[in-house]
Image (cartoon, helix red, strand yellow):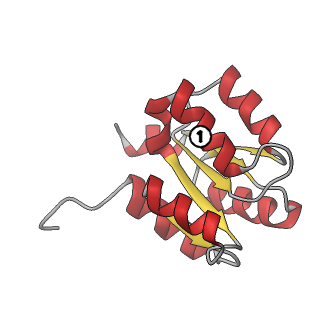
Amino acid sequence: MSTEMIKRAKVLVLEDEPIIGRVAARTLISEGYEVEVALNGYAAKNKIDTNNNYKFMIFDIKTPGINGIQLYEYMEKVYPELTEKVIFTTGDSLGEATTGFLQRVNRPYLNKPYTPLQLIELIRTAFFPEPAGV
């Protein structure tokens, strides 16, 4: 896939904190992505059920209604191929349930608060790793 095609890719951000959602969206838009933000898990689930061709998805673990964990578990059952496209953000990486979940799914995650640069670096590492020997 060419860089130009990657840069036009759609991204879904599940984030219930509007300021963090705007920062994430601006960061991703500045990198050339088309961004959709869902403020709760129900909205994110609807977006995935309607149009699940996202290049990657960023799920906040703690959101109202359906949380990021529940949405991921839904995807494991209905869209298992999409689970490899998810990274998580959390302000609760020390909570037992969150820690256990992150260990089980073995997906990349960022602790809040994070910087735009940390977000971009995680995305590049998770989805666009450098070829060996470069």
Residue 56 visible in image:
yes
In the picture, residue 4 is in which quadrant? top left
The residue lying furthest to the left in this view is: 133
Is 57 situated left or right of 131 in this image? right
Number of labels in the image equals 1
Residue 133 place in picture, x, y as percent: 12, 67
Residue at 71%, 73% in the rendered image: 91
Residue 17 place in picture, x, y as percent: 85, 62
Q: Is residue 92 above or below residue 29?
A: below
The foreground one among 87 and 128 is 87
The residue carrying mark 1 is 73
Q: Is residue 90 above or below residue 48?
A: below
Residue 60 place in picture, x, y as percent: 70, 58
In the picture, residue 126 is in which quadrant? bottom left
Secondary element at tag 1 = helix
- Quarter of the image that includes the N terminus: top left
